[in-house]
Image (cartoon, grey):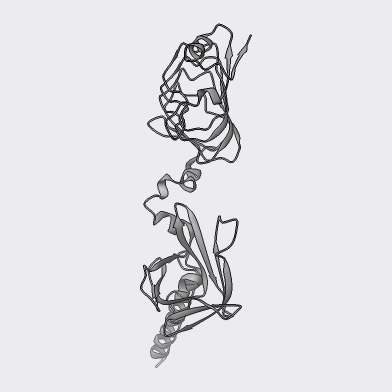
Amino acid sequence: MKNFIVIIMCLILLTACNSEETTETQTNSPTETTTERSTRTANSIVGTWYELRNDDRFNVWSFKENGCYKYIEESREDNMYDHSGSYTVENNVVTMTDSDGVVKGKYRIKYTDYGVKFMYADRAGKPRELYESRQQVLESSEDYYNTPSYYRTIADEDGYVVEEDGTIIYVGYDDEITLPSDLKVLISFNGFQEIKKITIPGTFKKIDEYAFSGELMDCMYIEEGVEEIGDGAFDLTGVSEIHFPKSVKKMGERLITNIEDESTINETKIYVKKDSYAHKYFIEHGATDNLIVEE
């Protein structure tokens, strides 16, 4: 009898431990959050969800337990598509209504391993994919690894990434920058934004052809030490001012052109050293309207 009682007590303790372990797994697991559990609950859409609009820009959906929702298109300054209101979920169909009683969306909910899919309930259309985190939605895009968001995860403290082929990528927030000085040839530059002033250190010996093509900038300052500049190096940049050093010994053709492939060299202020190669180059190419000669 005594042995039987001991066995019963052991079974009770074992059951309690298993129950406690299960509860802890449900509440403390790093892979499960309140939002994730809500996606496994029928007729529930509570949480904040992220939808990729293009490149690395988001739509953010937020559904509260009190029946209120908010929809925001991030990175839009006009906020013309942002809206909020109330929502209901019935038979796994969510209906969103704004403060004026106008239905803003009606979607059938399909739960997924990454979040939730909104299927249009009242018309045909491509489903909207909603994710539980920004990183998930970014990594779902084939273009993610070519976006500023990705490059910022691997950039150095100054905001630069130097790729294997020598391309320099800048994803910082300064509008006046000096490029990294540990390369000899500037193959290509990508800044993802218009930059006011770019300084090229004299450690570079060559600026390759079309190195800055399509990169919007206002001023380019090339330090002493650079010796060669390739064809179309500043093509489609809209640059208004370039400073050329005395050290330059060779320059290609059509350095600066516009979208119509017309030379705009006479529309750019060009600073050169007197009697330098660059000075003679621009005179020979008839680019004297805005040629500024320095001693």
Residue nearest the observer in this picture, 105 or 69: 105
Residue 256: x percent and y percent?
47, 26
Quadrant location of residue 240? Answer: top right
- Relative placement, left or right, of 68 versus 142 is right
Q: Is residue 200 visible?
A: no
For the point 47% across and 79% down, the residue is 94
Quadrant showing the C terminus: top right
Furthest toward the bottom, the residue is 1
Residue 28: x percent and y percent?
50, 68
Q: Is residue 48 visible?
A: yes
Q: Is residue 264 above or below residue 50?
A: above
Residue 220: x percent and y percent?
56, 26
Residue nearest the observer in this picture, 89 or 231: 231
Residue nearest the observer in this picture, 82 or 154: 82
Residue 273: x percent and y percent?
58, 11
For the point 43% across and 25% down, the residue is 232
